């Protein structure tokens, strides 16, 4: 294993342990405070980030810019009319 890969795994393990500490402290300790809450919410927020996204121009089946605007105005593009 490369050193960079080991460092990434160590960092992920350490941050995961920190997140679990904060969540368990919030759940079990009556004196838990803002720090634990910030760590727990921040970790949850990172988990919902769309990190597996690609730019719209590279996405398969992506819709063109302005599609909703044209649809609301009732206009069609050449592709939608069946013309090429």
Image (cartoon, grey):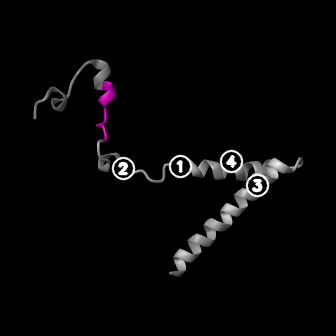
Q: Is residue 55 magenta?
A: no
Q: Which residue is mark 4?
A: 41
Residue 25: percent from the left, percent from the top? 81, 53
Q: Do labels 3 and 2 touch, CB within 8 Å?
A: no
Which class describes the residues within 10 Å of circle 2: few (<14), some (14-19), or many (20+)? few
Name the residue rendered at 29%, 19% in the picture. 73
Q: Earlier in the sequence, mark 4 or mark 3?
A: 3
Residue 80 visible in the displayed image: yes
Q: CA distance from mark 3 to mark 2?
A: 34 Å
Label 1 secondary element = loop
Dominant SS type (magenta):
loop
Q: Which residue is mark 1?
A: 49
Q: Which residue is mark 3?
A: 22
Q: Earlier in the sequence, mark 3 or mark 2?
A: 3
Q: How many marks?
A: 4
Q: Which residue is mark 2?
A: 55
């Amino acid at each position: 294993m490369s050193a960079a890969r080991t460092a990434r795994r160590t960092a992920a393990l350490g941050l995961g342990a920190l997140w679990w500490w904060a969540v368990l402290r919030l759940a079990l300790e009556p004196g838990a405070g803002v720090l634990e809450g910030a760590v727990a919410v921040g970790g949850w927020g990172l988990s919902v980030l769309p990190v597996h996204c690609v730019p719209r121009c590279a996405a398969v089946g992506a819709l063109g810019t302005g599609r909703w605007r044209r649809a609301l105005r009732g206009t069609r593009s050449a592709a939608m009319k069946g013309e090429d």
